[in-house]
């Protein structure tokens, strides 16, 4: 692959709801430029882009791919992202390094939940958009209905094309601005060739062109004045106006076609070149100078100091760890040394590669505006900024979505523990939405991700790459104990067995805290009833006992403790004796303090199509949820609720089943509430049984 100047490089992310056909579009692009000899099939497992074994098995994209497309003296880096919601974390990573987004819509369904989500991600990065309505050849395809659903997301969508026929009768595209028809070949399959506009579309085209020009000139005062002065607008003026309006977000062009039949794909490439800016067309990149902690900038030019950003890490068999880098300024060259401010080390660039599907191409450099992959670096990973030696700058990190589902994992054999830890740590490097945590309270290893499928894939990778099998279980709920009444307790420890004995004696008062769940300790001893040197021992004994739990084995919280009296023995008293006395006192006080159990409550937001709102609300009510409100959001409704954590196990799977795969949600910890009586009884009885068995 030849070298391209920065102004000839475009970076676009292909984003959509699942099954809209992104990967087939990219595959067809590769075929049309001669990079592959045939268009593979995701469904048949022959895709040249989705070539990982798990992608072939599952028949959908799991990890994003950077695919360079050489088209009309330009290089377009197309990042094919997953549409399946479990792998949505790949989307913000891709968008963070692109100059534009291609949002793919299924012509048979229009906008769906994940379409809305990825749209909002592209808005967050202020990216110009082009909409491609795919699958125009499918039964029940409708261009107009798809446009209507898009207008619920934005009124700025503007159709640049008219489809010739729909469904099985779809046979080509009319370019409104150029007044040209591009017709498919035999069996309505492409690539399309210029042809005659069918007579029945001529009047429709005439009307559509007037409407399109009016929308274009609304974005440009000079053109508007010229238009209303009835001066003729040139095609070049209109194309330049669309480019500026797309770049500024005033217009979102809409195209259509069929990736499966190769209709409209070459035109999509043309429009990317016409309407998506290159990196060099944009303003300076904003950075943080880590030495001065102030904002600084660098021009997006090869003449600037080197600045790169790692947006993705992966591990390829037979290659090792690979980091994908967007170069914002300067040039990354093979053999060049760079500095990583996070790890504070210097590294050397060895191998530079790019991938066209399965094919790996070695490169000598990556210029400003381009994307490439660096192989086998020592300590450079996702969200790292890399820069010239002598600098310490940082690109804003990617904000990844938080996990929504967790599982406890237990290796089947003890010898697998180390390999499991090694594998899970590596997976976190590859996928920042995959989290691993150790819950010391329960001694559990918890894996968290974006859905049940996400975690299933990770465990399959653990088996195939590290030969580790694990058992899974529902993570234990972090219940807490507390009190509802003020109470007093006496603790006395006296032991005499010849020689020096043990003696500790204290009185405490406890009362519930209303403002938070802290445990406070107050020393209210006067007159030396307990020497000051033993007071910390009393506190330690109380806190250790509360940390282990008293009625159900969960840490006790939300308690004010006051040590107000006691006695001591000049010879027999000791720290240990007063620790034990403190433990006895807190246990005694709990007996009459209205001890109870708190359960964690999550705050959730569920986004669903309007026709599923009733079912989702009913399901949340059945989970003891409290509905806080509902807000319309485009074609969807966002339901806000608070739900006990114990009721949310595998909710992601249940929601997708309830909404035919279209529902989506986020969750975060909110607060603690008193658990239902049946839960309290169950937990206390289980703990009592556990203690009794321990005595045996």
Image (cartoon, rainbow, N blue to C red):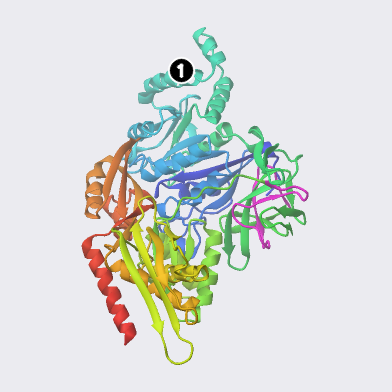
Residue 548 in the image: state x and y as whole percent.
39, 71
Residue nearest the viewer, comparing 271 with 148 = 148
Residue positioned most to the top: 229
Q: Is residue 683 something one can see in this rendering?
A: yes
451, above or below 115, in the image: below
Q: Kindly identify the residue that appears in the image at 47 percent across and 31 percent down.
A: 253
Q: Is residue 365 magenta?
A: yes
| Span colored in magenta | 364-393
Viewed as shown, does residue 134 lie left or right of 377? Answer: left
Residue positioned most to the front: 527
What is the quadrant of the C terminus in the image?
bottom left
Considering the numbered disc 1 on the image, is that residue within a helix, a strand or a loop? helix
Residue nearest the viewer, comparing 73 with 638 = 638
Residue nearest the viewer, comparing 504 with 13 = 504
Q: Kindly identify the residue that appears in the image at 49 percent across and 26 percent down.
A: 250
Q: Which quadrant holds residue 555?
A: bottom left
Q: Is residue 189 something one can see in this rendering?
A: no
241, above or below 488, in the image: above
Q: Which quadrant holds residue 302?
A: top right
- Label 1 belongs to which residue? 214
Residue 524 in the image: state x and y as whole percent.
43, 60
Secondary structure predominantly adopted by residues drawn in magenta: loop
Q: Which quadrant holds residue 489?
A: bottom left
Residue nearest the viewer, comparing 569 with 372 = 569
């Amino acid at each position: 692959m030849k070298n391209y100047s920065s102004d000839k490089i475009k970076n676009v992310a292909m984003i959509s709801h699942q099954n809209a056909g992104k990967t087939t579009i990219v595959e067809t692009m590769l075929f049309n430029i001669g990079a592959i000899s045939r268009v593979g099939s995701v469904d048949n497992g022959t895709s040249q882009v989705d070539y990982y074994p798990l992608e072939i098995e599952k028949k959908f994209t799991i990890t994003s791919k950077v695919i360079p497309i050489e088209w009309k003296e330009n290089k377009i880096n197309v990042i094919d992202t997953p549409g399946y919601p479990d792998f949505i974390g790949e989307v913000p990573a891709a968008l963070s390094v692109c100059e534009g987004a291609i949002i793919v819509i299924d012509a048979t369904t229009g906008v769906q939940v994940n379409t809305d989500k990825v749209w909002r991600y592209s808005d967050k990065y202020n990216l110009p958009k082009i909409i491609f309505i795919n699958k125009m050849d499918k039964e029940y395809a409708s261009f107009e209905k798809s446009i209507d659903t898009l207008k619920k997301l934005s009124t700025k969508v503007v159709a640049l094309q008219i489809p010739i026929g729909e469904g099985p009768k779809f046979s080509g595209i009319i370019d409104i601005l150029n007044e040209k028809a591009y017709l498919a070949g035999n069996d309505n399959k492409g690539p399309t060739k210029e042809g005659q506009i069918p007579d029945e579309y001529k009047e429709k085209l005439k009307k559509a062109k007037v409407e399109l020009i009016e929308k274009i000139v609304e974005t440009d005062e000079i053109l508007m004045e010229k238009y209303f002065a009835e001066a003729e607008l040139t095609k070049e003026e209109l194309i330049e106006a669309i480019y500026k309006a797309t770049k500024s977000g005033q217009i979102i062009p809409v195209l259509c076609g069929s990736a499966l039949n190769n209709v409209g794909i070459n035109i999509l490439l043309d429009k990317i070149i016409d309407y998506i800016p290159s990196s060099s067309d944009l303003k300076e990149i904003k950075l943080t100078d880590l030495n001065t902690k102030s904002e600084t900038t660098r021009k997006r030019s090869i003449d600037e100091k080197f600045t790169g950003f790692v947006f993705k890490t992966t591990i390829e068999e037979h290659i090792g760890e690979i980091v994908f880098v967007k170069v914002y300024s300067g040039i990354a060259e093979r053999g060049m040394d760079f500095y990583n401010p996070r790890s504070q080390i210097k590294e050397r660039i060895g191998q530079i590669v790019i991938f066209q599907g399965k094919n790996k191409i070695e490169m000598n450099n990556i210029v400003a505006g381009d994307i490439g992959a660096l192989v086998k670096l020592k300590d450079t990973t996702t969200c790292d900024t890399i820069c010239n030696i002598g600098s310490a700058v940082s690109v804003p990190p990617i904000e990844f979505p938080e996990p929504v589902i967790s599982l406890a994992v237990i290796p089947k054999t003890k010898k697998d523990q180390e390999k499991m830890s090694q594998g899970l740590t590596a997976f976190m490097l590859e996928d920042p939405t995959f989290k691993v945590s150790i819950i010391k309270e329960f001694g559990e290893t918890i894996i968290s991700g974006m859905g049940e499928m996400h975690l299933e894939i990770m465990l399959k990778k653990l088996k195939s790459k590290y030969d580790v099998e694990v058992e899974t279980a529902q993570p234990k709920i972090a219940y807490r104990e507390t009190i509802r009444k003020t109470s007093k307790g006496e603790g006395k420890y006296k032991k005499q067995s010849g020689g020096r004995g043990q003696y500790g004696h204290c009185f405490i008062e406890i009362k519930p805290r209303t403002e938070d769940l802290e445990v406070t300790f107050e020393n209210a001893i006067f007159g030396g009833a307990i020497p000051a040197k033993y007071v910390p021992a009393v506190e330690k004994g109380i806190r250790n006992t509360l940390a282990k739990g008293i009625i159900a084995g969960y840490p006790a919280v939300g308690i004010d403790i006051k040590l107000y009296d006691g006695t001591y023995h000049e010879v027999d008293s000791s720290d240990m004796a007063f620790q034990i006395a403190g433990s006895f006192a807190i246990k005694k006080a709990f007996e009459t303090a209205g001890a109870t159990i708190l359960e964690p409550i999550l705050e959730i937001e569920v986004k669903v199509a309007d026709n599923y709102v009733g079912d989702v609300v009913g399901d949340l009510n059945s989970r003891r949820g409290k509905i806080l409100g509902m807000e319309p959001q485009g074609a969807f409704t966002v339901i806000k609720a608070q739900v006990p954590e114990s009721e949310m196990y595998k909710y992601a799977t249940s929601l997708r089943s309830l909404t035919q795969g279209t529902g989506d949600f986020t969750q975060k910890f909110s607060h603690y509430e008193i658990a239902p009586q049946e839960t309290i009884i169950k937990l206390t009885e289980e703990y009592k049984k556990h203690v009794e068995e321990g005595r045996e």
